[in-house]
Image (cartoon, rainbow, N blue to C red):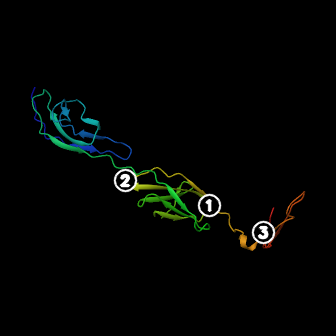
Amino acid sequence: ITSIVPANPVVNITQPTCTTATGTIMVTVQNSGETYSFDNGVTYQLDNSKQGLATGAYQIIIKSRGSCNNSEATSAVVNAQPVIPAKPTIEVNESNPDIPLLTSSVADGNQWYLNGMVIVGAKGQTYTVLTSGIYQVSATLGSCTSELSLAKVFLITGNEIKVSTINIRVYPNPVESMLTIGLGGFAPDYKVE
């Protein structure tokens, strides 16, 4: 059997993702019958790929069929898993109850949602509620996006009656068997039931 000295390994690295904590290294096959080491020649395997690799540097060696010749080692690095941002929270400021202001707990990378749909262009830390619905926010850091925040529900009811313009009379005081409530100051288009 003639043994061929393998060339230095050519590797393809699949790095960890937002949802997968480990990496994979695949070595380009040069000749049939070769074995592959991912730990600088300590152990060898027939498969040219190694999955489930933790963050770190790996020394890849190809051993020719017959175990006579080895390639030089090629270094391959599996990076750390990207950071997934924590699920943001929403603070509601109703100092102006006609226009509530939502604030995300995350300063940058926000995306606001209304009824589960992206609000186009709503990427700031704050968002002003103008429409009834269910509001949520997510945060993105690099290529990873958090879970959606807990929902905040708003119901915009339209015109509100200003209490300062309503006259309410309750009599007699004290009440024995019948209480009368008199309401005044309503505009003609208000119906009180």
Q: Which mark is residue 132?
A: 1
Q: 148 and 173: which one is in front?
A: 173
Q: Which residue is mark 3?
A: 190
47 left or right, relative to 107: left
Q: Nearer the viewer, mark 2 or mark 1?
A: 1
Q: Nearer the viewer, mark 3 or mark 1?
A: 3
Q: For the view shown, which residue lies furthest in the right direction?
A: 177
Q: Give the spatial CA distance, label 3 vs label 1.
A: 22 Å
* Disc 3 secondary structure class: loop
Q: Give the spatial CA distance, label 2 vs label 3.
A: 53 Å
Image spot of residue 97 (x, y percent): 61, 66
Q: Residue at x 25, y 39 (%)?
A: 26
35 left or right, relative to 15: left
Count neighbours of disc 2 (C-alpha within 10 A) and say few if under 14, some if 14 to 19, many if 20 or more.
few
Q: Which residue is mark 2?
A: 143
**Total marks drawn?**
3
Image spot of residue 55 (x, y percent): 27, 42
The image quadrant that residue 9 belongs to is top left
Count neighbours of disc 3 (C-alpha within 10 A) and say few if under 14, some if 14 to 19, many if 20 or more.
few
Mark 3 touches mark 1? (CB < 8 Å): no
Mark 2 touches mark 3? (CB < 8 Å): no
Q: Residue at x 35, y 46 (%)?
A: 17
The image quadrant that residue 154 belongs to is bottom right
Image spot of residue 130 (x, y percent): 59, 66
Q: Which mark is residue 4?
A: none
Q: Is residue 139 visible?
A: yes
Say which label, 2 or 3, has the lower sequence index. 2
